[in-house]
Amino acid sequence: MTVQVELSRIFIREMNEMQIIELAELEGSRSFPIVIGLPEAFAIERRLKGIEIARPQTHDLLGSIITMLGGTLTRIEITNLVEGTFFAVLVIDQNGAELQVDSRPSDAIALGVAHQVPIMVSEDVLEAASSENIDSILDDEQTDLLEDNDDLDLEDGTS
């Protein structure tokens, strides 16, 4: 069984390699963080803010390839969590056939945000991951830094 989630917050700290997105279930109260890289965080943030760039980035290229090959991205699925690493697939419809392409969750979400597709998480992953929270990923010093950096809260549209 899968549960639909949404991207609820993104923490971008330019002086740190570790960026964080938070996914929250639509029909419940569980949420969980995923650590991602800075380029993926910037790609997600640009898409959320509607910022156009002059040349296509990797996620734009992938989206164009899917479309040019007759496919449609239908959803993102976060399928597994092994030793702190999340696994995801892009679910693509190509002429009625469902294709699943292995992906890092950060890349999948960056592409999914651009195409406004649902993000689904397996119940097992949601149950295991929702015991984590953002503070458990960061030490006290890093948590203090969050207050001084870009924290895009998607629920109320403020940053």
Image (cartoon, rainbow, N blue to C red):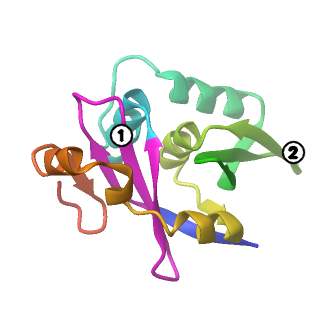
Q: Amino acid at mark 1?
A: Gln
Please, is residue 27 above or below residue 54 in the view? below
Please, is residue 61 above or below residue 139 in the view? above
Magenta segment's dominant SS is strand
The residue closer to the viewer here, 156 or 50, is 156
The image shows residue 12 at horizontal and vertical percentages of 27, 40
Q: Residue at x 48, y 48 (%)?
A: 113
Q: Which mark is residue 95?
A: 2
Q: Is residue 56 left or right of residue 108?
A: left
Query: How much space separates mark 1 and mark 2, taking CA atoms?
Result: 37 Å
Q: Residue furthest bottom?
A: 28
Please, is residue 20 above or below residue 102 in the view? below
Q: Counting residues from the N terminus, which is met first, the one under dot 1 or under dot 2? A: 1
Q: Amino acid at mark 2?
A: Asn
Q: Which residue is mark 1?
A: 19
Q: Residue at x 74, y 38 (%)?
A: 102
Q: Is residue 25 rendered magenta in the image?
A: yes
Q: Which residues are magenta?
A: 7-35
The residue closer to the viewer here, 135 or 14, is 135
The image shows residue 78 at horizontal and vertical percentages of 65, 54
Labelled pair 1, 2 in contact (Cβ < 8 Å): no
The image shows residue 122 at horizontal and vertical percentages of 70, 65
The image shows residue 2 at horizontal and vertical percentages of 70, 69
Q: Residue furthest left?
A: 148
SS label for mark 1: strand
- Give neighbour class at mark 2: few <14, some 14-19, many 20+ (Cα, 10 Å): few
Count of numbered labels shown in the rendering: 2
Q: Residue furthest top?
A: 55
Q: Is residue 75 rendered magenta in the image?
A: no
